[in-house]
Image: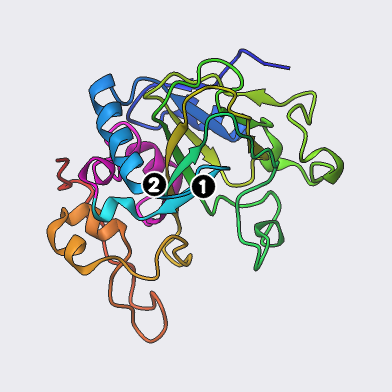
Amino acid sequence: MELTALPFSKAGEMTEMDQFIFECFGFIVIEDVLNETECDEVLEAAKRVHAGQPKEKLLQIGKGFEHEPAIERLIDHPAVLPKVRGLYGDNFVLQAAWCTVQPAGSQSVGWHQDGSSAYDFKKLAYPVPLVQLRASYHLTDQSQPFMGNMMLVPGSHRSKIDLPPSVRKEVYACAVQQILLARRGSVLLFHNGVWHSPMPNNMTWDRYNMHFIYSPPWLRRSDRDSTDSEFLENTTPLRRALMGDYARPDVPFAGGFPKIPFENGEHS
């Protein structure tokens, strides 16, 4: 059940081969984005975000970037953002940033596609359009099964048929599913239409991932109603633009979309 051929990519530019593989699989994996020191910094920040929360099942908490600089620095990471830009072009925003934990000895198996329960993205078009592009930073080791790994069905973002409901709570739900064996510091970039689920975490330590979700500028933000004004004042121009906190005309975007300062972005 564990397929070993992973769609690996190198940091930075979204190459033509990256584009082809992403279209085929619905996801790519970028290794060694964060080194051990950087992982430690973000992991400690993630633990602070979750401090005081119950540890019984998978839990995600949003907008940690507003008060944790180590998380903020990942918003426009130079290993990842060029790939987001390669898939979306120049007009996109950070729709959400979820810090997730799968506690030790717990499971939250539930196969699904990302989207909105208010209006299923599959209703927009076929194949389901790329409306949410998720960059998942692995802050703890997930190089062996049952470490809270992501499980995915490659190519399922192009299926007209849903994964049968009868198997959506099963670890081994589909003969062609893939268990992502990812080293700490790697990043999974995947399409909202790919069927996926977290694997149980049978380890004695909690599994932490940091998810950044990029979307078209008109999609409503899901981890915040608005972005903290102090954060916007003190962050870089690029990150401020990616928050999508801009004045809208009476008819949204009728006057054009404000240019995002990619070339002048500062990474701190």
Query: Going 77% across and 41% down the picture, which residue do you hit?
Result: 168
- State the CA–CA distance, disc 1 to disc 2: 9 Å
Residue found at x 33% / y 25%: 33
Indicate whether residue 89 is drawn in magenta. yes
**Residue at (44, 64) in percent of width and height:** 221
Q: How many marks?
A: 2
> Is 76 colored magenta in this rendering?
yes
Q: Position of residue 150 (x, y in %)?
A: 58, 31
Q: Check contact, mark 1 vs mark 2: CB within 8 A.
A: yes
Position of the C terminus, as image quadrant, is top left
Span highlighted in magenta in the image: 68-97
For the residue pair 74 and 230, the one nearer the viewer reads as 230
- Which mark is on residue 107? none
Residue closer to the observer: 162 or 196: 196
Task: Indicate left or right for 28 with 97 as reference.
Answer: right
In the rendered view, does 248 fall on the left or right side of 26? Answer: left
**Residue 18: % across, % down:** 48, 28
Q: Which of the two residues, 40 or 114, is positioned nearer the viewer here? A: 40
Give residue 20's position: percent from left, percent from top. Answer: 55, 29
Query: Judging from the image, what secondary structure is the residue with disc 2 in?
Result: loop
Report which residue position mark 1 lands on: 59
What x and y, as percent, mark residue 228? 25, 66
Hey, what amino acid is under mark 2? His
258 relative position to 127: left or right = left
- Mark 2, Cα crowd under 10 Å, few <14 / some 14-19 / many 20+, is some
Residue 121 relative to residue 44: left or right: right
Q: Is residue 64 above or below residue 73?
A: below
Q: Secondary structure at mark 1?
A: strand
- Quadrant containing the N terminus is top right
